[in-house]
Structures are given as C-alpha cells and as structure tokens.
Image (spheres, grey):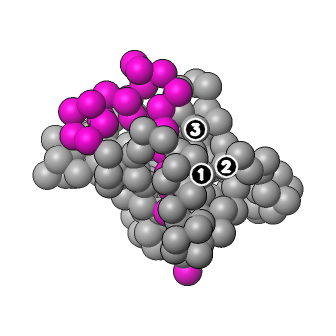
Amino acid sequence: MKIKRIEHVAIAVDDLDAFTGILRDKLGLTLEYSEVFPQYQTKMAMFPVGETYLEVIQATSPVADTARWIAEKGQGLYHICLEVDDINVALAELKEKGVKLLDEAPRAGHANTRIAFLDPQSTSDVLIELVEMPAAPSSEHLAGHAAD
C-alpha cells in the first residue's frame, strides 16, 4: 500500500454555510465545489489548500453519522483522508495486518472517488478514510459543482 498524500482533512460542523463563510471571508480560501450525499445524509464543501483540501461536512439528518459524531464529540476535526493508489489492495493489506474496517469494500465518495473508512478502534480513536481518485477527473469535478 502506498499512501500518496493527505487528500483532505474533514471538519464536522452544525452550520456548513457559517463555517464556509469563515474559511472564505476570514481566511481567504476559495470554495472549489460542494456536494450533497442523500445516501449518507450529509452535505459538504471542499476548499483547496496547497495539494490537499479542507472538507467541511454537515449532517442533513439527526441520525446521520456526522450528527451523532457532533452530538458525542462536538464540532471539529472529524477525520483525515489519505489517498492511496489502489483502495482494494490497501484494504486487503490493512485487514491482513489486523486493522478493523468500517467498510469492507470501497463505496462512492466525493468527486467520483472510491472511499473506505477504518474502524477507529484500530487507529487510536482517530477516524481515517482512504480514497482512490478516479483515473481521470470527471468533467463535473473540473467544471466545479454547484456552490451553495
């Protein structure tokens, strides 16, 4: 398994618009795109910082994983996302090393990526996401998603 870079650092918030306003208006960051994920009951916004991103996530339902996280731990750092070359190989290698997986197989992620989460019980209570980027960026990603 080769980790290529930190793809993003995710921040869980109660109010996506308020926090993205801080990033934009106070810190001068530019919103690259935003997405809504009905299947995960979340919406998110991506702000590039160098070769990585700050991902801001808000639950759209009180039963979403992000909402439960905030209820238990408060707003703040949610997870770190590491880009890998081949997510299937990475998951198999980690499983062989005894790492518990929240996702046994990759699932759909932001900007047509494939993602999987490791069980925080195996990572000192830190939620880690793995991501495999698409072979070629989607035209939707290149054009940007509709920003809220």
Q: Distance of mark 2 from mark 3, alpha carbons?
A: 7 Å
Mark 3 is surrounded, within 10 Å at the Cα level, by few (under 14), some (14 to 19) or many (20 or more) other residues, namely some
Q: For the residues labelled 2 and 1, say whether their Cβ atoms are less than 8 Å apart.
A: yes
Residue located 16% across and 41% down the image? 121
Taking the magenta stretch, the answer to whether it contains residue 41 is: no
| Closer-to-camera residue (104/29) | 29
Q: Is residue 104 above or below residue 147?
A: above
Q: Amino acid at mark 2?
A: Ser
Residue located 52% across and 49% down the image? 18
Residue 45 has which mark? Answer: 1
Q: Give percent across and percent down for residue 116.
A: 44, 43
| Closer-to-camera residue (15/147) | 15
Seen as rendered, the residue at the extreme bottom is 50
Q: Is residue 108 above or below residue 132?
A: above
Q: For the residues labelled 2 and 3, say whether their Cβ atoms are less than 8 Å apart.
A: yes
Q: Distance of mark 2 from mark 1, alpha carbons?
A: 4 Å
* Residue matched to label 2: 34
| Closer-to-camera residue (8/54) | 54
Residue 43 has which mark? Answer: 3
Q: Amino acid at mark 3?
A: Lys
Q: Which circle's residue, 2 or 3, is located before the other in the chain?
A: 2
Residue located 76% across and 61% down the image? 137
Mark 1 is surrounded, within 10 Å at the Cα level, by few (under 14), some (14 to 19) or many (20 or more) other residues, namely many
Q: Is residue 70 above or below residue 46?
A: above
Taking the magenta stretch, the answer to whether it contains residue 69 is: yes
- Give the extent of the magenta segment: 50-74
Q: Give percent across and percent down for residue 23.
A: 53, 65
Q: Give percent across and percent down for residue 6.
A: 44, 69
Secondary structure of the residue carrying numbered label 3: strand
